[in-house]
Image: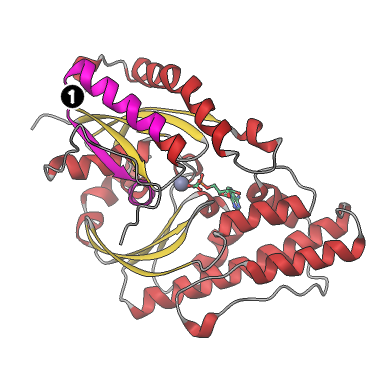
Amino acid sequence: MSSTRILAIETSCDETAAAVVEDGRHVLSNVVASQVELHSRYGGVFPEMASRAHLEAIVPVVNQAMRQSHLGFGNVDAVAVTHGPGLAGSLLVGVNAAKGIALGHGLPRGAVNHLEAHIYAHWIQVDSTDAIRLDGAWETGFPYLAFIISGGHTQLILMRAHGRYEFLGGTLDDAAGEAFDKVGRLLGLPYPGGPAIEEAASRGKPSGFSFPRAWLKGGYDFSFSGPKTAMFRLVQQYGEPPKGQLQADLAWGFQTAVVDVLSAKAARAAEEFGATALLLCGGVSANQELRRVMTERSPVPVHFPPLFLCTDNAAMVGACAYRHFNAGQLAGWDLDVIPGLRLA
Ligand code: KG4
Ligand code: ZN
């Protein structure tokens, strides 16, 4: 059987990314141009700046991904792109680029849901042990519990089969990553707050600061406004952004509270729905403390992609598009962006 190569594009938020993926699992190239430096000046993603930065970066990024793959457009079978959820102006850049490439080279188009793409990061082969996993249990071990924890989303999703998803719960206010970013700003830490809080927390210890956990009557929804407001009040009490040991202890307290709720709810959902594995997805799943606690509490094996596949990238888009392509699900020329697209 000949292989299927997909050029994938991702521009839903603040990374301009392109990748070439073979058969949904082999990454032939993977290029990510981050806008972190640009947005760090504002302490968060500035939507109009993001779309303009995508416009500047998209062609060089696609060209680099093609060069890295050592393929010409003539050797690519389809072009796939994230069409939601995300920032409208950012998504438009990727979708239009994909249409232009498809038009120029006579290629079929695939439209990918960014959330589904985060899940398919798990099907990408990273080393030879993964190949064994992928050929075996990964195709038959359903249901999996996918936990998407990123800057824009916090969703527990039961994956019953390829393409079959049930929404179990999600955030009622901020996404977990967004809460990390906002609290990072309160603590005077650089953007993005997630990695900065993790680093500060590694020097912190329990010190009596209390951060509430929103258990929400035991359901699978989440809320992070409680610990965020608690941090706001504590920082206000001190009158200026904390430094040194105080900053580290506050970061530790906040991270511990968030990790506690995330891991407890995911572990319970895995049990209740008979999942065979827990798949952590999205930027926040890069957090080592979250990985540790989740692994300790989960009744089933916990999988996390390598860091470069946790945060936004186009390889995961190519992996996801492969399933659609094989199922004959292609997008028409009327393909539009859907900023509020849901998975289930
Ligand atoms: O998946 P992602 O790259 O983009 C979205 O789709 O949102 O996730 C970005 C988010 C940011 O909020 C960032 O602060 C968070 O992931 N993040 C982390 C860590 N690394 C990235 N949060 C906690 N700990 C980390 N180590
Ligand atoms: Zn994402």
- Residue occupying image coordinates x 50% and y 66%: 171
- Residue occupying image coordinates x 83% and y 71%: 207
Query: Hey, which quadrant is residue 178 in on the image?
Result: bottom right
Given residues 340 and 201, the one toward you in this image is: 340
**123 lies left or right of 223:** left
Query: Hey, which quadrant is residue 323 in on the image?
Result: top left
- Image spot of residue 306 (x, y percent): 47, 44
Residue 263 included in the magenta stretch of the image: no
Residue 119 included in the magenta stretch of the image: yes
**Which residue is under mark 1?**
107
Image quadrant containing the C terminus? bottom left
Residue lying at the far right in this picture: please name it. Answer: 239
Magenta region: 92-120
Residue lying at the far bottom in this picture: please name it. Answer: 217
- Position above or below: 190 against 148: above
Is residue 118 in view? yes
How many residues crowd around disc 1 within 10 Å: few (fewer than 14), some, or many (20 or more)? many
- Residue occupying image coordinates x 28% and y 21%: 100
Residue lying at the far left in this picture: please name it. Answer: 1
Q: Secondary structure at mark 1?
A: loop
- Give amino acid for label 1: Leu
Query: Hey, which quadrant is residue 269 in on the image?
Result: bottom left
- Image spot of residue 57 (x, y percent): 48, 22
- Image spot of residue 37 (x, y percent): 65, 31
Q: Would the CB of label 1 be found within 8 Å of ligand 2?
A: no
**300 lies left or right of 307:** left
Q: Main secondary structure of the magenta part?
A: helix
